[in-house]
Image (cartoon, rainbow, N blue to C red):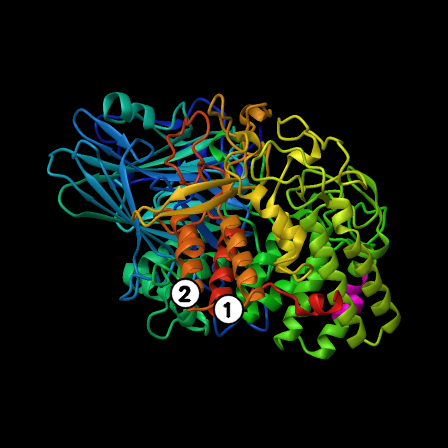
Amino acid sequence: MKKLNTITTSLLMLGLTACGAQQEPSNSAVMQVSAPGAPGAEPFWAYAGKAGIGTSYEQYQKGQYSDEAPTGAVSKVWFSIAKGMITETMFGLIHQAQIKDMQFVVVGKDFTVTEADDLDVTIDYLYKDDKGRPLSLAYKVVSKDKQGRFSLEKHIFTDPDGQTLFVRSVFNTELEGVKAYVSVNPYVDNNGLDDFAKTTEQGLLAWQDNSYLSLQGAQPFKQTSVGFTGVSDGLSQLKTTQQLTQVYKNTGEQSGNVSLLAELGEIGENSQFDLTLSFGNSEQTSFKQGQATLAKGYQAVLDHYNGKGEALGWQDYLQSLAPLNNMSEQTADNGKLLYTSAMVLKAQEDKTNAGALIASLSNPWGETVSAKEGSTGYKAVWVRDFYQVAMAFMALGDTATAKTAFEYLEKVQVNSKTPGNKGDTGWFLQKTHVDGELEWVGVQLDQTAMPIMLAWKLHQAGVLSDAELSDWYSRMLKPAADFLVDGGLAKILWNDTQITPPATQQERWEEQEGYSPSTTAAVVAGLITAADIAKLAGDDANATRYLNTAKRYNNDIEKLMFTTAGNLESSASDGEYFIRIGQDTDANSDTKINANNGREGFNKKQVLDGGFLELVRYGVRDALAPSIVKTLPEYDDETLTDNLQVKYSFSFDDGSGTFAGYRRYGNDGYGEDEVTGANYAQGGKNSPGQRGRVWPFFTGERGHYEIAAANANNSLDTTKQQAIKNSYVKGLEQFANNGLMLPEQVWDGVGVNKAGYKLGEGTNSATPLAWTHAEYVKLVRSLSDKQVWDHYPVVTKALK
């Protein structure tokens, strides 16, 4: 365990941490200096199904975030809300969680109820327009005791001028002698161990090394205590005796999983408490941040966050998105989810590394994932997810973020200076931290193609000039295109593999090697757009090379990936369809693909996925091409044996019919165990009963196909447009939770439902998923434009 420095240890032993009424124990509590029980309970992350996320909106200065005038300090605080509680709150880099949770506790004469208990919870937005569309990521969360003893309303947002989370709590009870407390479980610097804590005159403090967080109130706390979670944190005392019998000033010389506890006071009707959770690189800085926020007061901070008056805030960001109002006409909820999606996508950008777009502000299945060590979870960069989000920003009219994101990509491309690289260059890393630190190093060829595709789109939109595009061609795009043609040796960390395109080491689900329709669609589109860019840059020789290679890959697609000897037990199948992936050059062979996620390997002709639709999206295949049309019956077949079934139908809540949802592929094991109901890889091990569930963004992918197919047969009239809106767009909206967050996966009704999910409800995998919100935004823009947003006409033209 880490040790306190000598000066701090001396202060703690002398008890020089607090004085006055704030620290005098009530209820005859015995005060002791140091809490026992280090290191406390084993730490785990919080529930990953977030009902809300938030951060302050900050404006770029020359394509970057800057603390210089005129905008002032950049707020680098993010928060999340799950099951009514404030959960992982980040400071610094977007993946650096500082707490697991912050929850309120209500104590009566004969009861103690925490927010982690089963309360009736509703979530809403504090600032909306007259159509009910959110105008900022400021939340109102109302939690009601099931026995009617009290209610709690929380208002949650950050201070755009500081490093502070602001929380207003309003309690209501008709009972007498009821008290409210607040408890915080710090995970300073992104892990649940190695923290210290103490009480002070200003409030409560936790720290690790040079990272500090403080809890303060607008009113002095009645009583405070710190301790080790699950042992001396005070909650167990409140739960058993409804009072604190012992309080502690500090956690002593040993670090661990610590907790902060403060008594707010007695509550009655409309009892209000304003709190701040603040961050800094010193104790003094942390407390000053909170004090400054409290001095400004609730309304001033909220108005700035919202963007009222002269201050820049979320409302200003929404107003800058020119296509938003027209796009809203193609939604089924008057634009509520569209407005939310725009803000959610922008909120999942790091503010130290501008343009770094993460996959989700969550740790999948967090409550059963150990937090002993730091983990980014989904708070990291995958270039594929990144591309989806950048294209959504383009669809929203936010070309500034899209351009900054594109420029960021240079940070995650493998070059001669990439740490540990002993192989070839040009490909893009599988997964990295937002500062570029390596995490996963598999080669996914779609992730190498997509930056080229994005550059082409940015140039077509006039966001990148000819000169800028030519410069990026030599710096980043040519090395990527060369790798898509020549392949090479990936030799970095664990990886030591020769890559021979179009075979990929990993397809878009990061699990299988071989020939993938979705990967090949991106590779062909990437090379054709690279050829177009190369011409502009005056590199005619490579333009010809890229184009010829793309045509060669294209000519082999059906031979490698379209079986004419399928063996699915399906009345809808004629035996001809695209397979998910093949690991040899004969689509009709009976080879097995690899086992993964606890599931045994299956004959490749048994496993379907929707990757073939990407061939249409990018322009590699016409929507009515025979191989595409022939695959749709199998893809849509709901009579397949359950493990191999991909499509599932869900009913709209308003009784207006059904809509489609899809799993990633048959035999998917990335999800809860259908036999035991356990979380994915619970206990650190995969199990054979794990089952991947329905992913909502496939509803958007299928909606995009329907637009392309309608255009192909000249049937995209007003009636067809309405039909797509009222099925695929509305279906995606149906998958959103009460906070309008779109999940990675939803419950499909198969197997043991240990968590009590409703059909179509987001599971605990990851919510919100940026890709899902991006797909929704792009579908709405595609429907508004009456053409697929991600389509590359240069690809279609080149392949004719």
Q: Which residue is mark 2?
A: 719
> Which image quarter holds the C terminus?
bottom right
Classified by dominant secondary structure, the portion drawn in magenta counts as helix
Above-or-below relation of 315 to 553 = below
The disc, 2 or 1, on the residue closer to the chain's N-terminal end is 2
Q: Residue at x 81, y 50 (%)?
A: 501
Q: Is residue 590 visible?
A: yes
Camera-side mark, 2 or 1? 2
Between 58 and 669, the one lying in front of the other is 669
User: Of the numbered discs in the image, which one, if any, rests on residue 786?
Assistant: 1
Quarter holding the N terminus? Answer: top right
Look at the numbered discs 2 and 1 and tell me whether their residues touch, using CB distance below 8 Å. no
Amino acid type at image mark 1: Lys
Residue positioned 53% across, 63% down in the render? 710
Which residues fall within the magenta stretch? 472-479
SS class of the residue under badge 2? helix
Residue drawn at (44%, 59%), measured in percent from left and top?
724
Q: CA distance from mark 2 to mark 1?
A: 12 Å
Q: Is residue 794 above or below residue 448?
A: below
Q: Is residue 475 magenta?
A: yes
Amino acid, disc 2: Thr
The foreground one among 229 and 306 is 306
Q: Position of residue 621 (x, y in %)?
A: 67, 59
Secondary structure at badge 1 equals: loop
Which quadrant of the structure image shows residue 258?
top left
Of 202 and 79, which appears nearest the observer? Answer: 79
Foreground: 600 or 40? 600
Q: Is residue 284 magenta?
A: no
Indicate the quadrant where residue 541 lies: bottom right
Rendering coords of residue 498 (x, y %) = 85, 43
Crowding at label 2, few (<14), some or many (≥20) Cα neighbours within 10 Å?
few
